[in-house]
Image (spheres, rainbow, N blue to C red):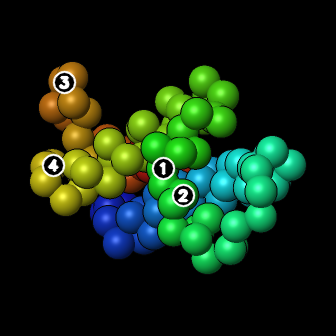
Amino acid sequence: MKTIDKNHLRERLQTRLDEIIERHRHTEDTEKMLHEPEIEPEERAQKLSIADVYGYLDEREKRELEAITHALSIMETGPYGFCEVCKKPIDPERLEAIPW
């Protein structure tokens, strides 16, 4: 059986998280530009956060974002790679397919 490469999976999780956030930051930026007076792009970028983006996500993306942040948290604090219900190890190939 293959072993879990947590660093690789952490990078994949972070990349997916960044993709979701960036896609919706663009949507949010466009909407703000249409409804707000001009402000500096740097100022706008500083104000954006996951919480700002969260309101623009559909339900599937919200669940995925929550699952990704939960998986990243478990990697730092708990036994990543084990089922939270039955406590058995999760197959590394399954984690590779869906690391969250």
User: Visible in this render: residue 12?
Assistant: no
The structure residue drawn at horizontal position 32% and vertical position 65%, both measured from the top left corner, is 6
Q: CA–CA distance between discs 3 and 1?
A: 31 Å
Q: Are marks 4 and 3 in contact (CB under 8 Å)?
A: no
Q: Which of the two discs, 3 and 1, labels the residue nearer the N terminus? A: 1
Q: CA–CA distance between discs 4 and 1?
A: 25 Å
User: Visible in this render: residue 2?
Assistant: yes
Indicate the secondary structure of the residue bearing disc 1: helix
Q: Percent from the top left, x then y, of residue 43? A: 58, 71
Rendered image quadrant of residue 25: bottom right
Q: Quadrant of the N terminus?
A: bottom left
- At label 3, counting other C-alpha atoms closer than 10 Å, the crowd grade (few under 14, some 14-19, many 20 or more) is few
Judging by the rendered image, the residue that carries numbered circle 1 is 50
> Relative to the observer, which residue lies in front, 12 or 35?
35
Q: Which mark is residue 86?
A: 3
The structure residue drawn at horizontal position 35% and vertical position 72%, both measured from the top left corner, is 7
Q: Percent from the top left, x then y, of residue 32? A: 75, 49
Q: Which mark is residue 48?
A: 2
Q: Is 86 situated left or right of 8 in this image?
A: left
Q: Nearer the viewer, mark 2 or mark 4?
A: 2
Judging by the rendered image, the residue that carries numbered circle 4 is 79
Q: Percent from the top left, x then y, of residue 87? A: 16, 32
Q: Are marks 3 and 2 in contact (CB under 8 Å)?
A: no
Q: Are marks 4 and 1 in contact (CB under 8 Å)?
A: no
Q: Percent from the top left, x then y, of residue 47? A: 51, 60
Kind of residue at badge 1: Ile
